[in-house]
Structures are given as C-alpha cells and as structure tokens.
Amino acid sequence: MTSVVEVRFKGNRKEYCTWPSPPTEALRHDDAVIVEVERGQDLGRVSALGDVAAKKCDRCGSCGHQAPSLPSRIVRRATEDDLRVEADLRRTEDDVRRKVRDRVQGRSLPMKVSDAEWQWDRRKLTIYFTAEQRVDFRALVRDLAGLFRTRIELRQIGARDEAKRLDGIGRCGRQLCIASWLPEGRPVSLSLAKDQGLSLNPTQISGPCGRLLCCLHYEHDFYVQQRKRFPKEGKVIRTPAGTLERVLAIDIFRERVTLRAEDGSTRVVPLEQLTA
C-alpha cells in the first residue's frame, strides 16, 4: 500500500512524497527520512501522514501532481550517520552565506542574500535572496559553481517567504504565524485593518518582515460577521426609548454601542438592550 507523506526541510520548505508502507515499517511524525528529489537525495522530517497529508497535498497543488502520483518518494529512514552529515552541512551554511554575500557585493548586485541550503547529498546548493527588481545573476552563478563545485540554484523569494524561512518572534510575543502554522502568506491590504478598526499607519500594523501582519487576514472574517450584528457607525437610529441618537463607536468584544444624543451627551448601551 502506497501512502502520502508530508516532509519538511530546512526553512519550513515542504514536499509531498510517496511511501510504500509495509505494516512493519510505518512512519511516525518527526521521523527523519531520505527523500528522492530531482538529481539526488535530501533529508527531511515527517510532518503529516495518511489522510491529513493527502488532503494537504490535494489542497496545495503547487507541483501539478495529485496524490498518489507524486514526483518525490521516500527512499528510507535516515540513519545516525545521515543525521550527522546533515548537522555538518547546517554548520557550514553560515560560512557559505557569508561567501555568497561577498561575491554579491563584489559584483554590486541589487540583492540581499537571506539563506543558503545544502542538499543532503551536496549535489545542489540553493541560495535564497530578496530583491526589489529583476536581477541578472548568471555571472554570479558561474562564479559560485566554481567556488563550491556543485550545482547552484539562486531562488528569489518575497519578504513573507523570507520570514517563513528565517522564523522569528512577532510583535505579539509569539512565534511568527507564517513560520509555525499558517500554510501560506497571502497578500494583506489596508482595507482589512480599516474593517477591524485598527490604525492605518503601516508601521503600527506590520510584522518583522516589513509587510502588513498576516493575522489581519485570517481574523478578518470574524470582524465582518460580527459587524453585521451592530448598527453602522455614523448612522442615526431610534432607540427603544424613542429618541434619535447617532452611533459613535461599536465594541465588538464587549458587545456595546456608544451613542450621542441631539444635546451632545453620550452614553454606552449594551447591544442586547439596543436591539430589544
């Protein structure tokens, strides 16, 4: 029986692979495995199994394949020697990144090197970078190929993808959503902050990546649904007491409405009382 397995690599990179699973060799969450990839093998850790992995694979669809006809497959479990090789590679990547940055500065290329990642079998070295515009890095690739004696791939990523790879702590004091549980970083606009009654100053609602907070997006539906229960701000309504008052503000979480009467006085009314 062939099952689908989600495998994660360095920097929250993930792939969906097949695993011909005999009952005696069932994989478990966080098992280290050797995966067959394009032109070689790589080492990752199991992050989802069975139906959960199959559903995530179908929803992703980024590789153009559907389970179980996937391009990658798990070759075997990783051994202690395999893990030592991976640890050695991770230790060398900081030095690799510094050397690449020196080459970039030497060629005055308008790009920022974010991370470097060796493939487990050292047949490929991937350099991740950010840039504001298109960069011609063909000469740089030839230079790096001669320096590291392997196949070089330069991959341009966005600010959110960089935050996902490097991880960090958000302004809420917790691990970045995009590096912990958020499946992908979707574009966020100021209109989402406006709907939630937040400051429209980008510096106050942006994350460490410099982009608007991801949480504005996945909390937005809650605010939209809750606001339907309240009168619109600025609207003049007739209260149960029979007076005309203008809605100054609404408090979604405490379910209260601030009203201003014609004489200029203000009061706070529970939503339940207002709609009775």
Image (cartoon, rainbow, N blue to C red):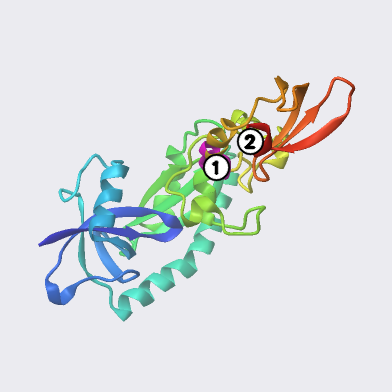
Total numbered badges shown on the rendered structure: 2
Above or below, 168 relative to 187: below
Label 2: state its secondary structure: loop
Q: Position of residue 45 (x, y in %)?
A: 34, 66
Q: Are marks 2 and 1 in contact (CB under 8 Å)?
A: yes
Which picture quadrant has residue 123?
A: bottom left
Measuring 24% from the left and 39% from the top, which residue is drawn there? 64
Q: Which of 85/30 is in front? A: 30
Which of marks 1 and 2 precedes in the sequence? 2
Tag 2 residue: 196
Q: Provide residue 62's location: percent of width, then percent of height.
A: 31, 41
**Considering the image in quadrants, where does the N terminus appear?**
bottom left
Q: Is residue 135 above or below residue 171?
A: above
**Residue drawn at point x = 82 percent, y = 26 percent:** 260
Residue at screen point 51% across, 37% down = 221
Q: Is residue 163 visible?
A: yes
Circle 1 SS class: loop
Q: Position of residue 164 (x, y in %)?
A: 50, 51
In the foreground, 48 or 265: 265
Q: Main secondary structure of the magenta part?
A: helix
Q: Which residues are magenta?
A: 214-221
Mark 2 neighbour density, 10 Å: few (under 14) some (14–19) many (20 or more): some
Q: Foreground: 139 or 120?
A: 120
Quarter of the image for residue 206 reads top right
- Residue 37 seen: no
Look at label 1 and name its amino acid.
Glu
Q: Position of residue 67 (x, y in %)?
A: 19, 49
Give the CA separation, mark 2 to mark 1.
Answer: 9 Å
| Mark 2 residue type | Gln
Identify the mark at residue 219; answer none if there is no mark: 1
Q: Is residue 216 magenta?
A: yes
In the image: residue 81, left or right of residue 259: left
